[in-house]
Amino acid sequence: MVRRLSLRSQITILVGLLCFGLACALALSSAYIARERAIGRITQASTVAAQTLANILDQGMAERYREVRNIAQLLPLREIWNRDPAEIRPVLEQLKVSFPAYAWIGFARPDGTVHAATYRMLEGQSVAARPWFQDGLHGPAVGDVHEAKLLAGILGPSPDNEPFRFVDVAAPVHNRDGTLAGVLGAHLSWSWASEMRGDLLNQSRNPDQEIWILSGDGTVLLGPKTGTKPFTEPQVRAMLRQTSGAFEDTRDGQVFLTGYAVADGYRDYPGFNWIILSRQPKQVAFAYAQQIAATILALGFAVALMGILATSLIAAKLVKPLQILTDAADRIGRDPSVRAFPRVGGSREVARLASSLRSLMRRAGLAERRVLETEQRSQAAHAQHEKDLTALRSLAETDALSGLLNRRGFDLFSQDAVDQFQRYGRNFAVLMADIDFFKKVNDTYGHAAGDEAIRAIARTLSEHLRPTDKVARFGGEEFVVLIREIGQEGVLTVAQNLRRAVELQDIVSGEHRFSVTISIGGALIGPADRDVQDLIERADVALYGAKTSGRNRVVIDGLGPRLASSAA
């Protein structure tokens, strides 16, 4: 296939493939870099979002903790806690107005009875068993997220139809003499954390982002499937230990890039070790990378097409001097007006080739003149000289190693066959035979064995041909056979017989015994053939086909694939 393509086409195709490969490599590498950077950016953004919400919650809880503690410890207020609830209630309601997330604020006596509360809720009821009250008796305290059983019936369902949940803040209240007056307690609605989360999500404007809040034991406090534990205990312990970081989490067949931060307190507020998670699908990073890759690949294709077009034009200019030299070589010896190779421009190598070919023609002409002069002197010499000349001609037309005709002798014989075809239409064919893996014979057994193989094949070819047919050695391991008075089917038969005879032959060289095979290409003379050289060229192309199709084959130009590729 390569031999059928021009040099210009080969250069254009190779450059096109190179441009295409470079475009694909650039697109893939860019997509990989973009994906890794997108993953890093998303992971970092998730970690920052989680840390931001953790700080907001810690600082908010610290403010509430400080407010309740300060109200309980204010000296001017120590006189009112033993007064009528109507005098205490405005203080509590004013505190609630300052931060609407307070769902309930109340003051309970040391026995647990609620003495005063916002909107009079739970006044007169006992909260002695509630953890916030018990902890508040001993000092300022906070309680983790929980449902308020006593307030549930009063407040009713939350806007999202979920039970109300609260965070407790409590502090002991003392009289002026230092005796315990009771406990000041506040229920902070957990919807406050939901609002903080919503504000953060609105600011990010990322519809793919999710934010969860987990308790210190991994229970979901805010997020999908509240009350469940989506992570294993080792994972929860690792997050609490590292306090912030990121990891990949797979849920329902989808991978999420998850950043986390632990709300572990602020100043004197101890914190509950809430774990805040910020999650985004990893596929977002892939989509971004794929978009970049597609863009680069499209640009690469456009550049590749322009490169192919430019290469085709440049290759045409580079190949033109070679075409001129090829045309001149084909016409020399056929067109009397062409006696030498032209001078051509182009690359340094092409110019050197043209100069070398011109020099070769000059040397060939000089040698031809010397031969003609020698013949003229010989014809005028004695009869002994005539005999010597005949011997020299025979020696000049015979291959020294094989005893076959050489190229000069074959040309003289083949010219007669061409004349017979042109005058009387007598067909003839040319077979080109080449020893398969001949270099391996020389490398394995030595050059002496290689020479013996050439002589043995020369004998075999000569023995299996008619007296009217001729076989010559063109040099190396290449043989040429001219067969007279034969058709296409006969050419294939003769070629197969020669191939089988060589394949079955044992070659002996010293202590070595081996066998070789040959590949044969053939062509039958036709009206389009100007001389035997055209026929040899077609046979050589067929020989190349026999070699590339597996060797030890016969390929005849013009026959169908079944016959042309048949083997023993």
Image (cartoon, rainbow, N blue to C red):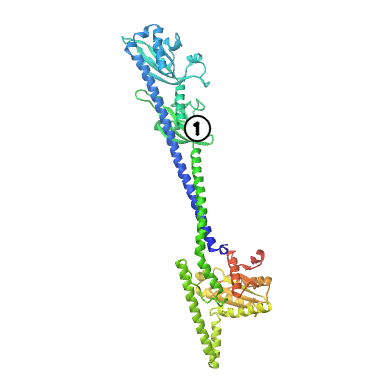
**219 left or right of 175 in image:** right
Q: Secondary structure at mark 1?
A: loop
Instruction: Where is residue 534? Give x, y as percent.
Output: 60, 72
What residue do we see at 50% from left, 52% from top?
Answer: 303
Image coordinates for residue 549, horizontal then vertical, percent: 60, 64
Residue type, numbered disc 1: Pro
Vertical comparison of 382 with 189: above or below? below
For the N terminus, the image quarter is bottom right
Give whichever of 565, 485 is nearer the camera.
Answer: 485
Against 250, is 301 above or below?
Answer: below
- Numbered marks: total: 1
Would you place residue 261 above or below residue 534 in this image? above
Q: Residue at x 51, y 38 (%)?
A: 283
Q: Residue 302: horizontal and vertical position, in percent?
A: 51, 51
Q: Position of residue 19 (x, y in %)?
A: 50, 54
**The one of 342 and 530 positioned closer to us in this rendering:** 342
Is residue 338 visible in this depiction of the protein? Answer: yes
Of all residues shown, which one is farthest toward the left?
177
Residue located farthest toward the bottom when viewing the structure as drawn: 382
Quadrant of res 486: bottom right
Task: Determine whether, in the image, residue 41 is placed left or right of residue 326.
Answer: left
Looking at the rendered image, the quarter that the C terminus falls into is bottom right
Q: Residue furthest top?
A: 84
Residue 406 visible to the viewer: no
Above or below 116: residue 342: below
Task: Between residue 501 and residue 53, name the one nearer to us.
Answer: 53
| Label 1: how many Cα within 10 Å (few below 14, some 14–19, many 20+) | few
Residue at mark 1: 207
